[in-house]
Amino acid sequence: MAVGNIAGTIPAGKLVKKIGLSKALLAFFILATVIFLMRSLTVSHACQLALAFLAGMTLSMWAVCLSPTVAQLTKERTRPFAFSLVLSVGMRATLQLRSIHLYLKMVSAT
């Protein structure tokens, strides 16, 4: 996924410039859903690698769109707070879901 993320950054920026932020984000949510669904249903190692690369490319669109979207949706005075809020909520959600995952893994092992 990391290679796909790096490889997808410039094309994602060009796509955002060409079709706009809202359409690019809509494409991201649709593509990410389809790709991760396909990854969960595929067993083949080669398919998993190809889908991981595509997932990384798709996720790079989120990274490219995040800052301009927050900037567009907020006034200049409130932007520092908005960026802090968006990024801290993302980090907190990641930590919380990781804790839940580890708990469920521990419970299922016993």
Image: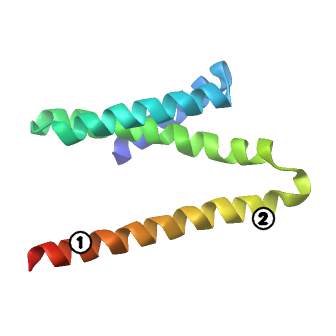
* Residue at x 71%, y 59% (from the top left corner): 83
Residue identified by numbered label 2 = 81
The residue nearer to you, when weighing 39 against 58, is 39
Q: Position of residue 49 (x, y in %)?
A: 21, 38
Residue identified by numbered label 1 = 104
Q: Is residue 66 left or right of residue 70?
A: left
- Count of numbered labels shown in the rendering: 2
Q: Quadrant of residue 20?
A: top right
Query: Which color scheme is applied?
Result: rainbow
* Residue at x 21%, y 42% (from the top left corner): 40
Q: Mark 1 or 2 closer to N-term?
A: 2
Res. 27 mark: none
Q: Quadrant of residue 16?
A: top right
Helix, strand or loop status at disc 1: helix
**Farthest residue toward the top?**
18
Q: Is residue 78 left or right of residue 34?
A: right
